[in-house]
Image (tube, rainbow, N blue to C red):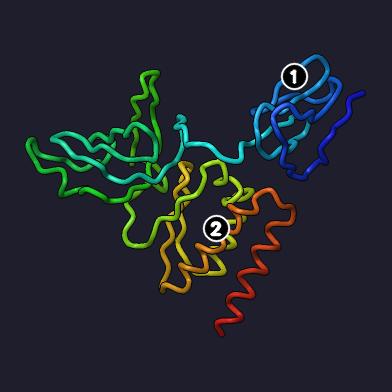
């Protein structure tokens, strides 16, 4: 029989070398490894379980692009045939004309008239090579240019908590603030509201989740925070 040393359905901050489970009933996932009959954390992070799987999500760390990620990028450079996009990584991603639009673009056209420097885009990562060349695309559901609003930078590891299960957390923030919100897996959260107050409330809610991502009952805490903030403004 194995023993789980962290509570099921709860998130716990653990340190490298901490034993998370014993026996063979549980399996290590990302951030954990097996040594003899023990599952041990390999990093400083938040431990949780999913069935028999035990994983640890790092508390911090830089964003590392992965195939299929949805990211928020900023146009950093333009040449005659493609755009170079800052996605918060050491290397810019490449967006070709083919992956940017289905419209015909004449040879020699100034493509900065389509997307200019500093424009924000919601993109999908379509390729990451061993040499760190990254390709992105604008062709797919939800992928688009972003106008107005503000970008809030958070740790990429906290984005799943900000989004919530099946989008529950970010959906609640949208409903309670009336803001349009897009979460990039690269740690960029775009928020656009009808007024600065609603954008500030949404931003504060995102920051609260980032700071307290390890706390249980977080959804209720965020909801109460926003209800109190809205009540004080009335």
Q: What residue is shown at x 79% (from left), y 28% (from top)?
A: 19
Q: Is residue 127 left or right of residue 30?
A: left
Residue 10 at x, y percent in the picture: 77, 45
Q: Is residue 127 left or right of residue 157?
A: left
Residue 171 at x, y percent in the picture: 57, 59
Residue found farthest to the bottom: 234
Q: Is residue 31 left or right of residue 67?
A: right
Q: What residue is shown at x 71% (from left), y 62% (from top)?
A: 220
Residue 202 at x, y percent in the picture: 51, 64
Which residue is tagged 2?
Answer: 206
Q: Assess disc 1: are there few (<14), some (14-19) or many (≥20) residues with their C-alpha within 10 Å of its C-alpha.
A: many
Q: Which of the labelled discs sits on residue 34, or is there none? A: 1
Q: What residue is shown at x 34% (from left), y 37% (from top)?
A: 137
Residue found farthest to the right: 1
Is disc 1 in contact with disc 2, using a CB cutoff of under 8 Å?
no
Q: Quadrant of residue 49?
A: top right
Mark-to-mark CA distance, 1 and 2:
35 Å
Q: What residue is shown at x 37% (from left), y 32% (from top)?
A: 90
Earlier-in-chain disc, 1 versus 2 = 1
Q: Quadrant of residue 88?
A: top left
Q: Assess disc 2: are there few (<14), some (14-19) or many (≥20) residues with their C-alpha within 10 Å of its C-alpha.
A: many
Which residue is nearer to you in this view: 121 or 224?
224
């Amino acid at each position: 029989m194995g023993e789980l040393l962290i509570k099921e359905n709860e998130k716990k901050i653990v340190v490298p070398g901490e034993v998370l489970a014993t026996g063979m009933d549980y399996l290590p996932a990302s951030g954990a490894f097996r040594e003899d009959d023990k599952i041990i954390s390999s990093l400083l992070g938040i431990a949780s379980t999913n069935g028999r799987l035990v994983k640890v999500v790092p508390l911090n760390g830089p964003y590392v692009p992965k195939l299929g990620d949805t990211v928020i990028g900023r146009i950093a450079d333009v040449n005659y045939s493609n755009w170079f996009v800052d996605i918060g990584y050491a290397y810019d991603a490449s967006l070709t004309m083919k992956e940017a639009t289905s419209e015909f673009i004449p040879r020699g056209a100034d493509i900065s008239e389509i997307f200019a420097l500093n424009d924000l885009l919601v993109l999908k990562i379509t390729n990451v090579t061993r040499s760190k060349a990254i390709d992105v695309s604008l062709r797919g559901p939800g992928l688009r240019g972003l106008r107005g609003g503000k970008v809030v930078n958070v740790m990429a590891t906290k984005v799943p908590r900000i989004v919530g299960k099946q989008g529950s957390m970010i959906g609640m923030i949208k409903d309670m603030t009336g803001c349009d919100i897009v979460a990039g897996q690269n740690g960029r959260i775009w928020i656009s509201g009808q007024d600065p107050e609603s954008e500030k409330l949404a931003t504060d809610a995102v920051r609260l989740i980032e700071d307290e991502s390890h706390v249980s009952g977080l959804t209720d805490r965020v909801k109460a925070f926003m209800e109190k903030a809205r009540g004080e403004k009335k």
